[in-house]
Amino acid sequence: LQLPESELPELHREPGLRMTERQKRRFQELQARRDAAAERLGLEASFIASKSALVALALDKPPEEWVLPWQAELLLSERPRGARRRRRAG
């Protein structure tokens, strides 16, 4: 398939970005939640959320622009659905 260059899709990239330490921690937290949910559900982790979506969420971009509601529920809820609260000792 050959298209003239004028009809090829444009690749839009944001300029290089350095995350703050808080944003890096948030990214790692989101990645861990995604990976745990993927393992629990028997899915490939990238099906739940791509790296670019995790970065966007770590940068506090609007979730509705990056993930679907079910993905946001898995990644952004305080406790994963069906998870039990830990009981306090004592």
Image (cartoon, helix red, strand yellow):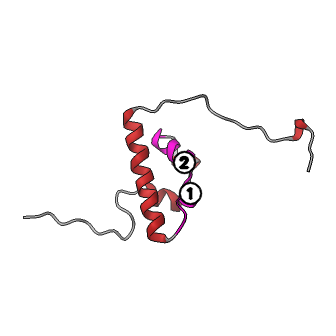
- State if disc 1 and disc 2 touch (CB < 8 Å): yes
32 shown above or below 88: above
Q: Which mark is residue 51?
A: 2
Task: Estimate the x, y position of residue 35 in percent, counting from the top left.
Answer: 45, 59
Amino acid bearing label 1 = Ser
| Number of numbered discs on residues | 2
Task: Name the residue: 14% across, 63% down.
Answer: 88
Q: Which mark is residue 4?
A: none
Task: Name the residue: 37% across, 34% down.
Answer: 21
Q: Which mark is residue 46?
A: 1
The range drawn in magenta is 43-60
Q: Determine the residue located farthest toward the left in the rendered image.
A: 90
What distance separates the C-alpha of mark 2 from that of mark 1?
A: 7 Å
Residue nearest the observer in this picture, 78 or 25: 25
For residue 39, which quarter of the picture? bottom left
Task: Estimate the x, y position of residue 37 in percent, counting from the top left.
Answer: 44, 64
Task: Estimate the x, y position of residue 29 in percent, counting from the top left.
Answer: 39, 49
Q: Residues within 10 Å of mark 1 (few under 14, many from 20)?
A: few
Q: Secondary structure at mark 1?
A: helix
For residue 79, which quarter of the picture? bottom left
70 shown above or below 4: below
Task: Name the residue: 43% across, 51% down.
Answer: 30
Amino acid bearing label 2 = Lys
